[in-house]
Amino acid sequence: MRYKLPPSIANLSPQKGLRILWLLRKGTRALPQALEALRAELGDMFVIKLGKFERVVIAHPEGLREALVEKREAFAWRVGDEPIVRLLRRGLLVQDGQDHLELRKILEPSNRRRHFLPKLSELYPLILPLFDSWREGGIYDMLVEMRKVALIAFEWVYFSHDVRGELHQIWKPILNVISYIGPGLWLLWGASAPPAAVQVIDAHLYTLIQMRKRETTPPDDMLTHLVREVSEDDLIRDQMLTMLIAGHDTSTASLAWALHLLSIYPEWQEKIHEEVKGAFGSNLPAPSEVTELPFLDAFVKETLRLYPPIHAGNRLVRLPAEIMGYSLRPSQKVLLSYYLVQRHPDFWEEAEAFRPERWLEPKGKQNTFAYVPFSGGPRMCIGAPFAQVELRMILAYLIQNFRFLPVSPIQMHMGATLEPYPGVKLKVYRR
Ligand code: HEM
């Protein structure tokens, strides 16, 4: 077989190559710009090779379809000795084959809408005191506030645990492990061991496991499903940590981006406020109904299009494969760039513009793999049904009761998730 290799940075003219290197030198905040410049110069599939670092980037919906569905057997999700694997060990996200299938079967029932909706209805008493503590006209960092909300929501729904009293203990350890799994120097020099802070999170998770095992009438949630079906505590811990990290850092980033966008598009804040008022008056927005609001829905979809929290999927090539006509060899590392695909000019009109109304317009046939905030195929995000309701429920409540004003500009930061940097400071007024 003749190899047809994707174009690489090395194919650029010295001038263009230097410009990209200059951007890459600036670190993770210039990564989005660097990736967009590379796509513009090299096309929809290209190689980034810098010293020991090498990744094949796939930036086209058809490339995603091939990698996620048609030729998925050629790829492994467990990408060698990387920080995410060291941290999550045998967690669902970094498992392959039969082990992955069996875990997914255990975790799936608690991620079904009819299963988690009753738990979400019980969430308001836990999160409302946080919003009530906001001072009139006070400035709050929504990246911090929404992380609190997302942690409380996650632990309530999946562990039936009110984590508010322990937030101060696990807060820094969680930020530490998130920074550990994000892009960093390990890409060049190899991964170090997880930070010692992970022991604090582990102690929290193992305590919950022990408590659950002692309960005579345990609640019907993910933790109970795990305790019933998995005999090893370490394997239960790996799933709990995987779901905790994947299930709150993403919602945190999405909520923070959405609030930032609401603050700079006040007309959308008013539109959605009217819509929520029309549907719920001054009652609490019902989780079972928040997905029925077209303006809120369009706003959330557009937020996730331009700012997908999981901006890329990491894969390891296991078997020789052809993607978009290019050859991939075993042991090559691949980045499925959800970020670039969702801003692809051939698939999105005014791709870089924030235009929620695009979701309200009658559309022709859209390529399914052009919109992939939760990825696609059989391994798409297991928590997507929960996240879809959670985001809309929290935003509906906040827009119903508060008005948000911007304070300072922000940038994108491609860390473990695509985060607003240095945070989202907003001025808050009660309606
Ligand atoms: C806005 C919120 C969320 C977004 C945008 C998001 C996005 C994604 C994406 C893109 C993937 C695929 C990653 C890849 O290709 O490597 C993924 C996988 C995953 N997500 Fe989410 N996610 C969100 C919320 C959640 C929640 C709430 C949970 C759990 C409660 C969760 C748990 C997971 C897990 C365990 C996987 C791995 C699934 C597997 O490999 O079988 N996510 N997510």
Image (cartoon, helix red, strand yellow):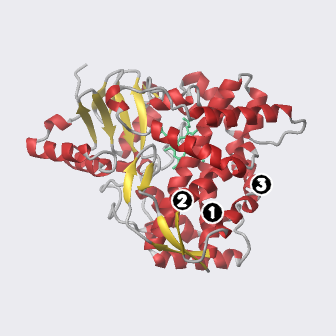
Q: Taking 154 as reference, is 210 left or right? A: right
- Residue 149, image x, y percentages: 63, 56
Q: Are marks 1 and 3 in contact (CB under 8 Å)?
A: no
Q: Are marks 2 and 1 in contact (CB under 8 Å)?
A: yes
List the residue tagged with mark 3.
118
Q: Is residue 75 above or below residue 426?
A: above
How packed mark 3 is, by other alpha carbons closer than 10 Å (few <14, some 14-19, many 20 or more), is few
Does the Cβ of the disc 2 residue fall within 8 Å of ligand 1?
Answer: no
Instruction: Give amino acid for label 3.
Output: Pro
| Rendered image: mark on residue 255 | 2
- Residue 32, image x, y percentages: 32, 50
- Callout in the foreground (3, 2): 2
Q: Residue furthest right?
A: 216
Ligand 1: image quarter? top right
Q: Are marks 3 and 2 in contact (CB under 8 Å)?
A: no
Q: Residue 43 occupies which quadrant of the picture? A: top left
The CA span between labels 3 and 2 is 22 Å
- Residue 3, image x, y percentages: 23, 24
Q: Name the quarter where the N terminus is drawn.
A: top left
